[in-house]
Amino acid sequence: MVIYKCKMCGGTIEFEQGATVGVCDSCGTKQTLPRLDDEKKVNWYDRANHFRRNNDFDKAMGIYEQILNEDDTDAEAYWSLVLCRYGIEYVEEPASHKRIPTINRAQFTSIYMDEDYKSAIRYADSDQKAVYEEEAKAIDEIQKGILEISSKEEPFDVFICYKETDANGRRTQDSVLANELYHELIEEGFKVFFSRITLEDKLGIAYEPYIFAALHSSKVMVVIGTKPEYFNAVWVKNEWNRYLALIKNGEKKMLIPAYRDMDPYDLPEEFSHLQAQDMSKLGFMQDLIRGIKKIATVDTPKETVKKNVVKDSGNTNTNANIAPLLKRVFIFLEDGDFDEADEYCEKVLDLDPECAQAYLGKLMAELFVEKQELLADCDEPFDDCNNYQKIIRFGDKELVSTIKGYIDQINERNENDRMTEIYNHAVNVMDSATTEAECRSAADVFQSISGFKDADVLVQKCLDTAEKFKVQEEEKRIEDEKLAKKQEKVISIITLIVFAIIIFVIVLNTLIMPKYKFYKAMGLLEDGDYDSAYALLEELENSDAIAANKYERAVALLEAGDLRSAYLLFRDSNYNDGSQKALELLEDHPSFAQIGDTVTFGRYEQDNDNANGKEKIEWIVLDKTDSGILIISSKVLDNLRYYAGSQRITWEECSLREWLNSTFLEEAFNTEEQLRIQSAKVTADPNPWYGTDYGNDTIDKVFLLSVAEVNKYFPADSAKACTPTEYAIARDVSVRNGNCIWWLRSPSIVSGYVVAISDRLTFATIGALYPEGVRPALWLNFES
């Protein structure tokens, strides 16, 4: 299994190598996956997705471009560029808890016209394509809503860009300075976008339409900052970066950086060609306002300029210019070149904004239709499209009637398909019906489509058949009742006889004989005949008495000096303090331990309370030789990365091995205990599934298990379960379903990924830079 971080919430997705679609364990969202076929691409995607989830879209885009430079057929990289371009952030919907997209970088261009979106669709497989198209549809709807809201906003003169709060949620000095500038500009008669006031009655997820409108209408943006990190804060940079892009694309706008209490050389590199203003200089505010006035002159009152629209019928020259363009539009449509067709429609509309034929061409391009009559073949009616509304508004009667006719044909066909589907379902129910209820159910379905085909006739047929089944079912019910009464009488007599016999046997076996054997066993115990007493108690299956018997025998053996035998009886007695006495014997005599036993050795912080000192470490015995035992901690003790550097390395060179054989060894064991730990040869076992470099054998005192050793010592999945200590939990160890993820030392599919036991108790592939649970193992000598 490969583990990948969710692009929406950052949770984990486990998937088989080669899969292109997966489901997040945390948010449950189905989403597309990249082709992680080499180590470098894994790193790129991890970093880029991290930046995108944190809304640092420009940094993320740079990394996705690097991926495409290496592989220009990577559909997921193209799709990720689309998400960054539109500033897609996935937020949790309170009612359904689903992750839904929100747009933070609205565009005038539809997502369907985006070249990266087209490339993603071109290179995606069928599963990826379905997900991309579904998400694109949702994003397109949101985009239309944003553009509709923003189109109704009054234009702004000045946009003030600044950071409102610091990392602790307190208001910044930048916000105070921005507030002063806002009131100064308002006094001068400017229409100013200042988020603290302009957006105070808007919900956070609904800001984008108003920010989008303000960015596009404002002639001046003033970026205020008192610290370099405030200029580069994610949302501040998002605003001024978008504004610079508009300037770069030819918009007549001006961006003015305004700084205070900082070195101007610490301003963002993108501002290097701009004239920055020092807010600490005397007369700064007057100079700034004077400069803004030059760019965004305020006229009081402002006059509205009305344009005279020339219609087709009144201007022969216009008609002459439009005709060739329209002809090319419909040639492009016949050739399937929808982008060119749409572009030429725009050229026509520049000449005549009320040309219905141009809106018809745009509608056909939007729906990917080559010929006008094929509009009737569209899957769904298109009367909610903006271009359709323009055709109805500006078209002549004949065109309007024809286009409306297509809508009627689509609705009629879809309704007929719906009715046919219901009819066929009802026929299937009717043909397979074997009960009254099934027949009446079929009749109800036919009734819902009354008047369609022979549905009304079949309603009556179903009801007639239902009556026949009703009579048959009633006759069968009466017959079954008679048979049941006869059987009840016979069963009652047999039950009384059997009950009497059972009572006699129970009294004999549970009262008379056990009582006799128990008193006899107690007498043997008083006489010191433990073996005979134990044999009688085993016959009685009296677990409490057996445990007490084992405990007494163990005490006697302990006093007699037979420590090994005493340990085995204490371990099995489960009586009084037998288990504790067994552990105490094992601390001094580990050679008594059997495979599967629990022993204590060394100390490590476990309850996350440093005040009470370290706690004894419990270990499970995995293997035993003449000279020692192989043990592994019964719990996950800590949470660490497999390696902490930037290189891709094996167990031989990883930082976790160094930590186990230095820091952990010294913290967990005193000098005497360290002498009892055997320096063991740790084999560099190859991964049984992949040919990844597995390094060389090592000599270690403390180590992790390999895949081969887990298969040997934990053959059942349930045996792989391991819970964390309170200390490990405080160290943010991964816990789900009560189980920990814990490291093995075996490499995985690519260098830089390591095999671990997942919370589902299966082998999983995890990036070595992620911290996971540490479960040490070691060989303990019987003697120092």
Image (tube, rainbow, N blue to C red):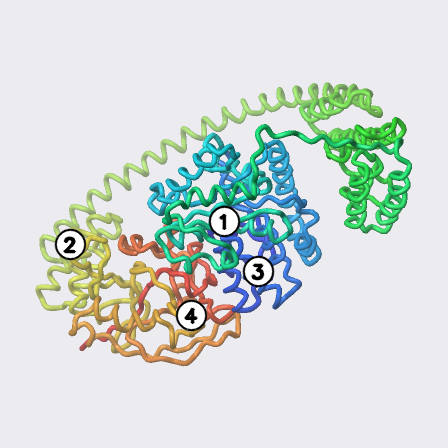
* Residue 256, numbered circle: 1
Kindly identify the amino acid type of the residue bearing the numbered disc 2. Ala
Disc 4 + disc 1, Cβ < 8 Å: no
Q: Earlier in the sequence, mark 4 or mark 3?
A: 3
Q: Residues within 10 Å of mark 4 (few under 14, many from 20)?
A: few
Image quarter hosting the C terminus: bottom left
Are the residues flagged by discs 1 and 3 in contact, CB closer than 8 Å? Answer: no
When the figure is inspected, residue 770 is found, relative to residue 521, above or below; the finding is below
Residue in the picture at 69% in, 27% down = 438
Pointer 3 residue: 64
Q: Specify which label sits upstream in the sequence, 4 or 2.
A: 2
Q: Is residue 634 shown left or right of residue 410?
A: left
Q: CA distance from mark 4 to mark 3?
A: 20 Å
Q: Which element carries disc 1, helix, strand or loop?
A: strand
Secondary structure under tag 3 reads helix
Instruction: Give me the C-alpha separation between circle 4 and circle 2.
Output: 36 Å
